[in-house]
Image (spheres, rainbow, N blue to C red):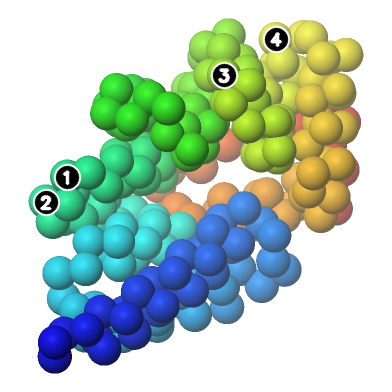
Amino acid sequence: MRGVPNNFATGSLVRSAGADAVEGALLFTTDRIAAFAAAEAKLTKALSLVPDHARAHLYLGLVYMLTKRAAEGIAECEHALVLDRNLVVAHSFIGIGKIYIGRADETEAHVAEALRLSPRDTLAYLWMSIAGDAKNHLGSWEQAVAWCRRAIEANRNYPQAHFNLATALAQLGRLDEAHSAAKVGLALNPAYSISRSRAARTAQSDDPTYLAQMESIFEGLRKAGMPEE
């Protein structure tokens, strides 16, 4: 029974850290740096208590990815899968990491694996949106639209899927649809803006391929009528 207190404390830390990481990732906080720092501190403590806690490695991987340490983040998520192969969301997080290191062309395969393993997962909408974002990075606008629409069908209340869709539609010249998608996204997350998105994205990676790909995304958001500030 000695491990019970540690497991209970670790579980609480990991859940709290996960909330911090997700809040920062989705731009629901004005101080993302503080959110990620809090998450990393909690996860470091959790892993000092239970070094093989798969979900702690998973969220630590996400925090690394969102703070210019994508290669380390991918490794953490791969380790999480070694510890618990049923932690399907790790596949999608690895897909995110691939975007940040300029290898967005590999993201779809990771998302497809997550969906193959858990096609009715409650987080499937998130994975599909990640694939849509990757396609936007690649300039594959039609494919991005298809992935984003799948994500929205799975969960209409996830704002980033609408923003990703708005980008792709705008770059295809379908401006009325793009404006509508942007409007829906802003209703769900009124604090979202191009400047906040740029600040968040540039804080995630300084990979030159990634940074170059972002410019067409911001261009699409601008065409879709997203606010600059």
- Quadrant in the rendering for residue 178: top right
From what the image shows, is residue 91 above or below residue 146?
below
Q: Are marks 1 and 3 in contact (CB under 8 Å)?
A: no
From what the image shows, is residue 52 above or below residue 161?
below
Question: Which residue is labeled 2 in the image?
Answer: 82
Question: Closer to the N terminus: mark 2 or mark 3?
Answer: 2
Label 1 crowd (10 A; few <14 / some 14-19 / many >=20): few
Q: How much space separates mark 2 and mark 3, taking CA atoms?
A: 29 Å
Label 2 crowd (10 A; few <14 / some 14-19 / many >=20): few
One can see residue 25 in this view: yes
For the residue labelled by badge 3, is the local secondary structure a helix, a strand or a loop?
helix
**Residue at point 29%, 41% (across, down):** 88
Number of numbered discs overlaid on the protein picture:
4
- Tell me the kind of residue under disc 3: Arg
**Residue at point 72%, 68% (across, down):** 30
From what the image shows, is residue 3 above or below residue 108?
below
Q: How much space separates mark 2 and mark 4, taking CA atoms?
A: 41 Å
**Residue at point 63%, 32% (across, down):** 155
Question: Which residue is labeled 4 in the image?
Answer: 172
- Tell me the kind of residue under disc 1: Arg
**Residue at point 48%, 74% (across, down):** 16
From what the image shows, is residue 222 above or below residue 180?
below
One can see residue 67 in this view: no
- Tell me the kind of residue under disc 2: Val
Numbered badge on residue 160: none
Numbered badge on residue 85: 1
- In the foreground, 222 or 92: 92
For the residue labelled by badge 2, is the local secondary structure a helix, a strand or a loop?
helix
Q: Are marks 2 and 4 in contact (CB under 8 Å)?
A: no
Q: Are marks 1 and 2 in contact (CB under 8 Å)?
A: yes
